[in-house]
Amino acid sequence: MSLLHEAPPPSYEPGEALEAAADSELPTYSRRIRRTTSTAEPATPKEFSYEIKGYFNKPWATLTLLGHPILSRKIATFIDGSEIAGSLKMNLRSPDPIKSVTVFVRGDLVVCGDPDERMNFFRMRKFIWTPSMGDPRAPVASNAGNTWEGKFKGEYNLPFSIKLPELAESPEGGERFRLPHTFTDRASRGSIEYYLEVRISRGKLRSDDRIITSFGLFTMHPPSPPSQLRQLAYRSNVPIPGPHSDPDGWHALEPVQIKGKLCGEQAVNAKCTVFLAKPVCYIFQTPVSLLNRFLKYQLCYTRGSSIPCAMTIEADDTQVADVLASIRSTALYLQRRVRCTFGYSSVNISRCGQAIWWPSPDAAAYLGNAGQRHIMGEIHLRRELHPSTAIKQFQVEYAVAVFPPAAVAFRPHNTGPLITQSVEVVTRHAHGVRAKTATIPPANESSDPFVDRYYESVADGALKQGKGLTLWKGASDLFP
């Protein structure tokens, strides 16, 4: 009789080390700062065991997975491109005609519904043992060319490792892509989940035994290093240079017009230009081939750090310029869009950060223009932010949205975003000097009723319910 171990789906709560451990996973080093060995990665992997029990509730087969020592919490977790290592131990009281032992790995897009639906985007398998490998107790080298025809009895230990590919290929073939980060969110009807099965096969007319469990996948992609002048500022522990002092280190968005009324009477017509600090991230698009491979770049930032930003406001009236530049927060927001087009189209847009502002060190360079104001700021990126993901009919995307400033006594004509700029969020810091934040993340974000109303209008109402997902109906449904 087949016995199935049903492991719970991945569940990463905000604040857990799985979402925050990228800092300690692969620390970056500067020439001036040397980290002690106490911050080194623990050498011992974290073990997760799953059993098949027989008569008298005694286990006769145990699957052990060796998860990453820092990232693994509730389930074994592995870094993309690394090896899934583990072992299968068996203790058989009577002869068992086992024909093969196989490891299967798969990744699914699971869509909440009644019933839940799943779409497989990745699968692979590896034989731990087959008769052609010889005696399962003998060393591998001594089994060359020997076919074993006996039965299993007693104790066996079958170690295995299966390498996750840098670029995976769709089961349908053709398309190649990076494996996405594990994703679960109550505000999204889609989730990215990974499963591993060890199957003990006995051939025709005999039942197989299986152990199936979920595991987590953690992506580790860094952005490019920041500009040389910004690196120098980080090393010297001084404020970073603005767009005027470091033009190559900033990306300027298209200028936008801010229109509205000041004090209910005075017409406002000002120009606003927002700058976002580079670096950029170069991304291989899919499918990957010698003929149609090309490079695309996006502004790229590491969660747990910040997005440095700057703003220039130009107005004919100096009073208007002063009022619009007097903001200390708002005007610039980080928003996340989770899009799922499997079954039916669903888009959830929410804000997940906002800028904090202060006077720009470049302001003295523009004293000749009385109607110009310059401010600097940053958007803190929470550690629990899910990295940017794009897989078939599911995407997690980020953008910086520019809204009219929520200045005192100013009422804008346009209450939606004036312009948006796509950005990439990753888990690993750039090589070299570590970027620093200039301010402390606020305990509570300030509220702008116009912005609140906008994000309420674009939020997706189809949220997940509190019940857990039905992972599979049976072993044959998940791993046919």
Image (spheres, helix red, strand yellow):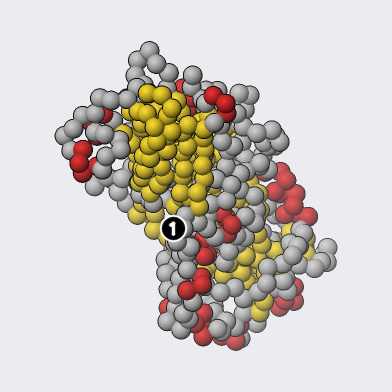
Q: Which residue is mark 1?
A: 221
Report whether 153 appears left or right of 467. Answer: left
Neighbour tally class for label 1: few under 14, some 14-19, many 20 plus, Cα within 10 Å? some
- The reply to whether residue 316 is visible in this rendering is no
Q: Secondary structure at mark 1?
A: loop
Q: Nearer the viewer, residue 161 or 250?
A: 161
Of all residues shown, which one is farthest toward the top?
Answer: 205
Residue at horizontal 63 percent and vertical 46 percent from the top:
349
Q: Nearer the viewer, residue 280 or 211?
A: 211
Amino acid, disc 1: His
- The reply to whether residue 397 is visible in this rendering is yes
Residue at horizontal 73 percent and vertical 46 percent from the top:
456
Q: Give the x, y percent position of residue 21.
A: 54, 60
Q: Give the x, y percent position of residue 360.
A: 62, 79
Report whether 120 appears left or right of 262. Answer: left
Q: Nearer the viewer, residue 197 or 100?
A: 100
Residue at horizontal 40 percent and vertical 28 percent from the top:
200
Measured along the vertical axis of the image, is residue 404 above or below residue 79? below
